[in-house]
Amino acid sequence: MKQLLKNKNSRTNMITYLVVIVAYLIMQTLNSMDMLGSSVRGYLVPLCVYISLAVSLNLLVGICGELSLGHAGFMGIGAFSGIVIASLLKGTVQSDTLRLIAAMIAGGAMAGVMGFLIGIPVLRLRGDYLAIVTLAFGEIMKNIVGNTYVGVDDTGFHFAISPTKMRLGEGGKYFINGPLGATGVEKLANFTMGFLLVMVTLFVVLNLINSKEGRAIRAVRDNRIAAESVGINVTAFRMKAFVVSAFLAGMAGALFGLNYSAITATKFNFNTSINILVFVVLGGMGNILGSVISATVLYILPEAMRGLEDFRMILYAVVLILVMLFTWSPKFKEATAVFTGKIKGIFRPGKEAGNNE
Protein backbone atom coordinates (compact mmCIF):
# COMPACT_ATOMS: atom_id res chain seq x y z
CA MET A 1 0.00 0.00 0.00
CA LYS A 2 2.86 2.34 0.87
CA GLN A 3 4.48 1.57 -2.49
CA LEU A 4 1.22 2.30 -4.32
CA LEU A 5 0.87 5.60 -2.47
CA LYS A 6 4.45 6.47 -3.28
CA ASN A 7 3.86 5.69 -6.96
CA LYS A 8 0.71 7.81 -6.95
CA ASN A 9 2.58 10.75 -5.44
CA SER A 10 5.41 10.28 -7.92
CA ARG A 11 2.99 10.29 -10.86
CA THR A 12 1.29 13.44 -9.59
CA ASN A 13 4.63 15.17 -9.11
CA MET A 14 5.83 14.14 -12.57
CA ILE A 15 2.63 15.47 -14.12
CA THR A 16 3.17 18.78 -12.33
CA TYR A 17 6.75 19.08 -13.56
CA LEU A 18 5.72 18.01 -17.06
CA VAL A 19 2.95 20.63 -17.30
CA VAL A 20 5.38 23.40 -16.35
CA ILE A 21 8.13 22.19 -18.72
CA VAL A 22 5.75 21.78 -21.68
CA ALA A 23 4.27 25.25 -21.07
CA TYR A 24 7.77 26.75 -20.96
CA LEU A 25 8.85 25.03 -24.18
CA ILE A 26 5.70 26.15 -25.98
CA MET A 27 6.12 29.78 -24.91
CA GLN A 28 9.82 29.75 -25.76
CA THR A 29 9.06 28.32 -29.20
CA LEU A 30 6.39 30.93 -29.88
CA ASN A 31 8.72 33.67 -28.66
CA SER A 32 11.58 32.51 -30.88
CA MET A 33 9.20 32.61 -33.86
CA ASP A 34 8.13 36.18 -32.95
CA MET A 35 4.55 35.04 -32.46
CA LEU A 36 4.20 36.71 -29.05
CA GLY A 37 3.40 40.39 -28.70
CA SER A 38 5.39 42.66 -26.45
CA SER A 39 2.56 42.76 -23.90
CA VAL A 40 2.41 38.97 -23.71
CA ARG A 41 6.19 38.75 -23.26
CA GLY A 42 5.86 41.26 -20.44
CA TYR A 43 3.44 38.95 -18.60
CA LEU A 44 5.74 35.92 -18.58
CA VAL A 45 8.05 36.84 -15.69
CA PRO A 46 5.27 38.10 -13.37
CA LEU A 47 3.30 34.94 -14.17
CA CYS A 48 6.22 32.77 -13.06
CA VAL A 49 6.54 34.88 -9.91
CA TYR A 50 2.87 34.46 -8.99
CA ILE A 51 2.99 30.72 -9.65
CA SER A 52 5.93 30.44 -7.24
CA LEU A 53 4.13 32.58 -4.68
CA ALA A 54 0.97 30.48 -4.93
CA VAL A 55 2.89 27.20 -4.54
CA SER A 56 4.91 28.52 -1.59
CA LEU A 57 1.79 29.85 0.15
CA ASN A 58 0.01 26.55 -0.46
CA LEU A 59 2.74 24.89 1.59
CA LEU A 60 1.75 27.06 4.54
CA VAL A 61 -2.01 27.28 4.04
CA GLY A 62 -2.86 23.98 2.37
CA ILE A 63 -0.26 21.59 3.77
CA CYS A 64 0.43 23.14 7.18
CA GLY A 65 -3.11 24.45 7.64
CA GLU A 66 -2.10 27.94 8.80
CA LEU A 67 -3.82 30.98 7.31
CA SER A 68 -1.29 33.69 6.44
CA LEU A 69 -2.27 37.09 5.05
CA GLY A 70 1.22 38.59 4.95
CA HIS A 71 2.83 36.76 2.04
CA ALA A 72 3.23 40.00 0.10
CA GLY A 73 5.36 41.30 2.98
CA PHE A 74 7.96 38.57 2.39
CA MET A 75 7.71 39.23 -1.32
CA GLY A 76 8.47 42.91 -0.74
CA ILE A 77 11.44 42.14 1.52
CA GLY A 78 12.87 39.90 -1.17
CA ALA A 79 12.23 42.45 -3.91
CA PHE A 80 14.03 45.38 -2.29
CA SER A 81 16.81 43.22 -0.83
CA GLY A 82 17.42 41.73 -4.26
CA ILE A 83 17.52 45.16 -5.90
CA VAL A 84 20.12 46.42 -3.41
CA ILE A 85 22.32 43.32 -3.80
CA ALA A 86 22.12 43.39 -7.59
CA SER A 87 23.06 47.08 -7.61
CA LEU A 88 25.99 46.59 -5.22
CA LEU A 89 27.38 43.73 -7.33
CA LYS A 90 27.19 45.67 -10.59
CA GLY A 91 30.82 46.78 -10.48
CA THR A 92 32.29 43.48 -9.34
CA VAL A 93 30.19 40.80 -11.07
CA GLN A 94 30.00 41.20 -14.82
CA SER A 95 27.49 38.43 -15.52
CA ASP A 96 23.88 39.59 -15.30
CA THR A 97 22.75 36.02 -14.67
CA LEU A 98 25.06 35.60 -11.69
CA ARG A 99 23.95 38.92 -10.25
CA LEU A 100 20.31 37.90 -10.64
CA ILE A 101 20.92 34.55 -8.96
CA ALA A 102 22.80 36.23 -6.11
CA ALA A 103 20.00 38.78 -5.72
CA MET A 104 17.35 36.05 -5.60
CA ILE A 105 19.27 34.03 -3.03
CA ALA A 106 19.88 37.14 -0.92
CA GLY A 107 16.22 38.17 -1.18
CA GLY A 108 15.12 34.68 -0.17
CA ALA A 109 17.58 34.59 2.73
CA MET A 110 16.46 37.97 4.04
CA ALA A 111 12.79 36.97 3.81
CA GLY A 112 13.58 33.63 5.48
CA VAL A 113 15.36 35.35 8.38
CA MET A 114 12.42 37.71 8.83
CA GLY A 115 10.07 34.74 8.66
CA PHE A 116 12.01 33.03 11.44
CA LEU A 117 12.07 36.15 13.63
CA ILE A 118 8.38 36.83 13.10
CA GLY A 119 7.52 33.15 13.50
CA ILE A 120 8.99 32.90 17.01
CA PRO A 121 6.11 34.83 18.63
CA VAL A 122 3.51 34.49 15.87
CA LEU A 123 3.44 30.71 15.44
CA ARG A 124 2.25 30.22 18.99
CA LEU A 125 -1.05 31.61 17.75
CA ARG A 126 -3.66 29.72 15.74
CA GLY A 127 -6.57 30.35 13.42
CA ASP A 128 -7.91 33.88 13.10
CA TYR A 129 -5.31 35.27 15.50
CA LEU A 130 -2.46 34.08 13.27
CA ALA A 131 -4.16 35.53 10.19
CA ILE A 132 -4.59 38.93 11.85
CA VAL A 133 -0.97 39.06 13.04
CA THR A 134 0.44 38.09 9.62
CA LEU A 135 -1.81 40.71 8.04
CA ALA A 136 -0.36 43.31 10.42
CA PHE A 137 3.16 42.09 9.61
CA GLY A 138 2.58 42.60 5.89
CA GLU A 139 1.34 46.14 6.39
CA ILE A 140 4.20 46.96 8.79
CA MET A 141 6.78 45.72 6.29
CA LYS A 142 5.18 47.78 3.55
CA ASN A 143 5.38 50.95 5.64
CA ILE A 144 8.92 50.28 6.84
CA VAL A 145 10.21 49.73 3.32
CA GLY A 146 8.24 52.76 2.15
CA ASN A 147 10.20 54.93 4.62
CA THR A 148 13.62 53.37 4.10
CA TYR A 149 16.50 55.10 2.31
CA VAL A 150 19.41 53.08 0.98
CA GLY A 151 22.21 54.47 -1.15
CA VAL A 152 25.91 54.52 -1.90
CA ASP A 153 28.47 57.24 -2.63
CA ASP A 154 32.23 57.70 -2.51
CA THR A 155 32.27 57.26 1.26
CA GLY A 156 30.46 53.92 1.18
CA PHE A 157 27.09 52.37 1.85
CA HIS A 158 24.36 54.40 3.59
CA PHE A 159 21.12 53.36 5.26
CA ALA A 160 18.51 55.47 7.06
CA ILE A 161 14.81 55.50 7.90
CA SER A 162 14.48 59.26 7.71
CA PRO A 163 15.20 61.60 4.77
CA THR A 164 16.85 64.13 7.09
CA LYS A 165 19.46 61.55 8.14
CA MET A 166 20.24 60.47 4.58
CA ARG A 167 22.81 62.67 2.88
CA LEU A 168 24.66 61.28 -0.11
CA GLY A 169 27.79 62.91 -1.46
CA GLU A 170 28.30 64.09 -5.00
CA GLY A 171 27.74 61.27 -7.47
CA GLY A 172 25.85 59.20 -4.91
CA LYS A 173 22.99 56.96 -5.94
CA TYR A 174 19.81 55.92 -4.16
CA PHE A 175 18.89 52.26 -4.35
CA ILE A 176 15.73 52.78 -2.29
CA ASN A 177 14.40 56.31 -2.00
CA GLY A 178 11.68 56.17 0.64
CA PRO A 179 8.12 56.55 -0.72
CA LEU A 180 9.51 56.80 -4.26
CA GLY A 181 10.75 53.24 -3.92
CA ALA A 182 13.49 51.86 -6.14
CA THR A 183 14.05 53.80 -9.34
CA GLY A 184 16.49 53.32 -12.18
CA VAL A 185 16.61 49.56 -11.52
CA GLU A 186 18.50 47.50 -14.07
CA LYS A 187 16.08 44.92 -15.47
CA LEU A 188 17.83 41.57 -15.05
CA ALA A 189 14.83 39.24 -14.91
CA ASN A 190 13.96 36.97 -17.83
CA PHE A 191 11.50 34.20 -18.60
CA THR A 192 14.08 31.42 -18.35
CA MET A 193 15.01 32.46 -14.84
CA GLY A 194 11.31 32.64 -14.00
CA PHE A 195 10.88 29.07 -15.24
CA LEU A 196 13.85 27.94 -13.13
CA LEU A 197 12.34 29.67 -10.10
CA VAL A 198 9.09 27.77 -10.60
CA MET A 199 10.97 24.49 -10.93
CA VAL A 200 13.04 25.16 -7.80
CA THR A 201 9.89 26.09 -5.88
CA LEU A 202 8.12 22.92 -7.02
CA PHE A 203 11.17 20.80 -6.20
CA VAL A 204 11.49 22.21 -2.68
CA VAL A 205 7.78 22.10 -1.85
CA LEU A 206 7.01 18.68 -3.38
CA ASN A 207 10.04 17.05 -1.78
CA LEU A 208 9.19 18.58 1.57
CA ILE A 209 5.58 17.40 1.33
CA ASN A 210 6.62 13.82 0.54
CA SER A 211 9.34 13.67 3.22
CA LYS A 212 9.08 12.68 6.89
CA GLU A 213 8.91 16.38 7.79
CA GLY A 214 6.03 16.81 5.35
CA ARG A 215 4.08 13.96 6.92
CA ALA A 216 4.68 15.50 10.33
CA ILE A 217 3.46 18.88 9.07
CA ARG A 218 0.28 17.29 7.72
CA ALA A 219 -0.20 15.47 11.01
CA VAL A 220 -0.04 18.81 12.82
CA ARG A 221 -2.62 20.19 10.40
CA ASP A 222 -5.01 17.26 10.76
CA ASN A 223 -4.89 16.87 14.55
CA ARG A 224 -2.60 19.00 16.66
CA ILE A 225 -3.31 17.14 19.91
CA ALA A 226 -2.69 13.72 18.36
CA ALA A 227 0.56 14.97 16.81
CA GLU A 228 1.78 16.27 20.18
CA SER A 229 0.84 12.98 21.84
CA VAL A 230 3.26 11.02 19.62
CA GLY A 231 6.14 13.42 20.28
CA ILE A 232 5.92 15.77 17.27
CA ASN A 233 7.22 19.26 18.06
CA VAL A 234 4.29 21.22 16.67
CA THR A 235 5.93 24.66 16.84
CA ALA A 236 9.14 23.45 15.19
CA PHE A 237 7.37 21.91 12.19
CA ARG A 238 5.10 24.91 11.77
CA MET A 239 8.24 27.06 11.84
CA LYS A 240 9.85 24.97 9.09
CA ALA A 241 6.86 25.43 6.81
CA PHE A 242 6.69 29.15 7.61
CA VAL A 243 10.40 29.81 6.95
CA VAL A 244 10.52 27.76 3.73
CA SER A 245 7.41 29.54 2.47
CA ALA A 246 8.93 32.94 3.33
CA PHE A 247 12.26 32.05 1.67
CA LEU A 248 10.58 31.05 -1.59
CA ALA A 249 8.40 34.18 -1.50
CA GLY A 250 11.55 36.30 -1.05
CA MET A 251 13.19 34.69 -4.09
CA ALA A 252 10.07 35.34 -6.15
CA GLY A 253 9.98 38.93 -4.91
CA ALA A 254 13.60 39.51 -5.96
CA LEU A 255 12.85 38.30 -9.48
CA PHE A 256 9.72 40.45 -9.55
CA GLY A 257 11.58 43.57 -8.40
CA LEU A 258 14.33 43.13 -11.01
CA ASN A 259 11.74 42.86 -13.77
CA TYR A 260 10.84 46.57 -13.60
CA SER A 261 12.83 49.76 -13.84
CA ALA A 262 10.93 51.26 -10.90
CA ILE A 263 8.90 49.76 -8.08
CA THR A 264 7.35 51.06 -4.86
CA ALA A 265 6.42 49.42 -1.56
CA THR A 266 2.71 49.97 -2.22
CA LYS A 267 2.87 47.13 -4.74
CA PHE A 268 3.26 44.65 -1.86
CA ASN A 269 0.11 45.54 0.03
CA PHE A 270 -2.80 43.59 1.50
CA ASN A 271 -4.49 43.21 -1.91
CA THR A 272 -1.46 41.35 -3.26
CA SER A 273 -1.56 38.91 -0.35
CA ILE A 274 -5.28 38.32 -0.94
CA ASN A 275 -4.70 37.70 -4.66
CA ILE A 276 -2.09 35.06 -3.87
CA LEU A 277 -4.45 33.46 -1.34
CA VAL A 278 -7.20 33.39 -3.98
CA PHE A 279 -4.85 31.45 -6.30
CA VAL A 280 -4.34 28.88 -3.54
CA VAL A 281 -8.01 28.53 -2.59
CA LEU A 282 -9.30 28.20 -6.15
CA GLY A 283 -6.54 25.78 -7.08
CA GLY A 284 -7.32 23.58 -4.10
CA MET A 285 -5.85 23.56 -0.62
CA GLY A 286 -2.82 21.31 -0.71
CA ASN A 287 -3.10 20.81 -4.49
CA ILE A 288 0.21 22.02 -5.94
CA LEU A 289 -0.73 21.48 -9.59
CA GLY A 290 -4.00 23.27 -8.89
CA SER A 291 -2.05 26.29 -7.60
CA VAL A 292 0.02 26.35 -10.80
CA ILE A 293 -3.07 26.26 -13.01
CA SER A 294 -5.17 28.71 -10.98
CA ALA A 295 -2.32 31.25 -10.73
CA THR A 296 -1.87 31.06 -14.50
CA VAL A 297 -5.54 31.42 -15.35
CA LEU A 298 -6.38 34.07 -12.76
CA TYR A 299 -3.34 36.19 -13.62
CA ILE A 300 -3.97 36.08 -17.37
CA LEU A 301 -7.75 36.56 -17.13
CA PRO A 302 -7.80 40.22 -15.95
CA GLU A 303 -5.06 41.11 -18.46
CA ALA A 304 -6.97 39.44 -21.29
CA MET A 305 -10.08 41.48 -20.39
CA ARG A 306 -8.20 44.76 -20.13
CA GLY A 307 -9.96 46.07 -23.25
CA LEU A 308 -13.29 45.96 -21.41
CA GLU A 309 -12.12 48.85 -19.21
CA ASP A 310 -14.61 49.48 -16.37
CA PHE A 311 -16.31 46.09 -16.73
CA ARG A 312 -13.06 44.13 -16.50
CA MET A 313 -12.92 43.67 -12.73
CA ILE A 314 -16.69 43.11 -12.49
CA LEU A 315 -16.47 40.21 -14.92
CA TYR A 316 -13.38 38.94 -13.12
CA ALA A 317 -15.32 38.89 -9.83
CA VAL A 318 -18.23 37.07 -11.49
CA VAL A 319 -15.84 34.45 -12.87
CA LEU A 320 -14.36 33.93 -9.39
CA ILE A 321 -17.83 33.42 -7.89
CA LEU A 322 -18.83 30.94 -10.61
CA VAL A 323 -15.60 29.00 -10.23
CA MET A 324 -16.11 28.73 -6.47
CA LEU A 325 -19.70 27.55 -6.92
CA PHE A 326 -18.72 24.89 -9.46
CA THR A 327 -15.64 23.81 -7.52
CA TRP A 328 -17.61 23.14 -4.34
CA SER A 329 -20.57 21.53 -6.14
CA PRO A 330 -20.88 17.78 -5.29
CA LYS A 331 -21.96 16.98 -8.86
CA PHE A 332 -18.98 18.84 -10.28
CA LYS A 333 -16.62 17.00 -7.92
CA GLU A 334 -18.15 13.67 -8.93
CA ALA A 335 -17.82 14.43 -12.64
CA THR A 336 -14.23 15.60 -12.14
CA ALA A 337 -13.35 12.44 -10.23
CA VAL A 338 -14.76 10.27 -13.01
CA PHE A 339 -12.86 12.22 -15.68
CA THR A 340 -9.54 12.17 -13.83
CA GLY A 341 -10.03 8.47 -13.10
CA LYS A 342 -10.35 7.74 -16.81
CA ILE A 343 -7.26 9.82 -17.59
CA LYS A 344 -5.21 8.05 -14.92
CA GLY A 345 -6.48 4.70 -16.21
CA ILE A 346 -4.90 5.39 -19.59
CA PHE A 347 -1.42 5.80 -18.09
CA ARG A 348 -1.72 3.24 -15.29
CA PRO A 349 -0.11 -0.13 -16.00
CA GLY A 350 -2.61 -2.98 -16.29
CA LYS A 351 -0.96 -4.99 -13.53
CA GLU A 352 -1.09 -2.13 -11.05
CA ALA A 353 -4.71 -1.36 -12.00
CA GLY A 354 -5.57 -4.99 -11.26
CA ASN A 355 -3.88 -4.79 -7.89
CA ASN A 356 -5.85 -1.67 -7.02
CA GLU A 357 -9.05 -3.50 -7.69
Image (cartoon, rainbow, N blue to C red):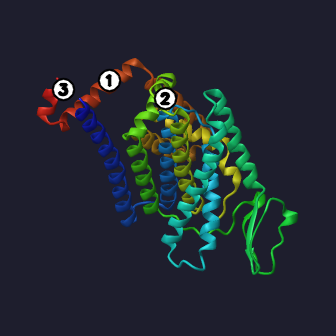
The reply to whether the C-beta atoms of the residues labelled 1 and 2 are less than 8 Å apart is: no
Which numbered disc flags the more N-terminal residue, 1 or 3? 1
Instruction: Read off the residue under disc 2.
Output: 221
Quickly name the residue at label 3.
356
In the image, which disc is placed on residue 50? none
Q: Which residue is mark 1?
A: 335
Q: Tell me: 44 left or right of 27.
A: right
Q: Earlier in the sequence, mark 2 or mark 3?
A: 2
Residue type marked 2: Arg
User: What amino acid is labelled 3 in the image?
Assistant: Asn
Marks 2 and 3, Cα distance to the nearest angstrom?
28 Å
Residue at position x 77%, y 60% in the image: 178
- Helix or strand or loop: what does disc 2 sit on? helix
Q: Residues within 10 Å of mark 3 (few under 14, many from 20)?
A: few
Q: Nearer the viewer, residue 159 or 179?
A: 159
The image shows residue 205 at horizontal and vertical percentages of: 43, 45
